[in-house]
Image: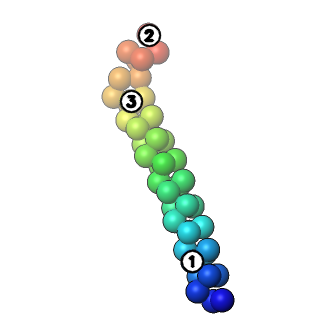
Amino acid sequence: MSVVIAALILRQTITVMAVLGIIVVSFAGALLVWSSGGDAVNG
């Protein structure tokens, strides 16, 4: 039974880490675009 609980916790942790990773990467990408060529993007 503990194995099932551990698997669920592990899966949830991986999901949270993946979501956080996507948020961080997208935020970093937006920041990079804004800092390097924000004026060109905004016109």
The N terminus is located in which quarter?
bottom right
| Drawn side of residue 20 relative to residue 8, left or right | left
Q: Are marks 3 and 1 in contact (CB under 8 Å)?
A: no
Camera-side residue of 38 and 2:
2
| Drawn side of residue 12 relative to residue 42, left or right | right
For image coordinates 41% across by 23% down, the residue present is 38
Which color scheme does this rendered protein use? rainbow
Pick out the residue farthest to the top: 43
For image coordinates 55% across by 61% down, the residue present is 15
Measure the C-alpha gap from mark 2 to mark 1: 50 Å
Closer to the observer: label 3 or label 1?
A: 1
Counting from the top left corner in percent of width and height, residue 8 is at: 61, 74
Please name the amino acid that badge 2 sits on.
Gly
Measure the C-alpha gap from mark 3 to mark 2: 13 Å
Measured along the vertical axis of the image, is residue 2 above or below residue 31? below
Closer to the observer: label 2 or label 1?
A: 1
Label 2 neighbourhood size at 10 Å, few (<14), some (14-19), many (20+)?
few
Tag shown at residue 43 = 2
Measured along the vertical axis of the image, is residue 23 above or below residue 37? below
Camera-side residue of 33 and 5:
5
Tag shown at residue 7 = 1
Q: Earlier in the sequence, mark 3 or mark 2?
A: 3
> Residue under circle 3?
33
Camera-side residue of 37 and 24:
24
Pick out the residue farthest to the left: 36
Q: Earlier in the sequence, mark 3 or mark 1?
A: 1
Label 3 neighbourhood size at 10 Å, few (<14), some (14-19), many (20+)?
some
Label 1 neighbourhood size at 10 Å, few (<14), some (14-19), many (20+)?
few
Please name the amino acid that badge 1 sits on.
Ala
Measured along the vertical axis of the image, is residue 31 above or below residue 14? above
Counting from the top left corner in percent of width and height, residue 27 is at: 48, 42
Please name the amino acid that badge 3 sits on.
Val
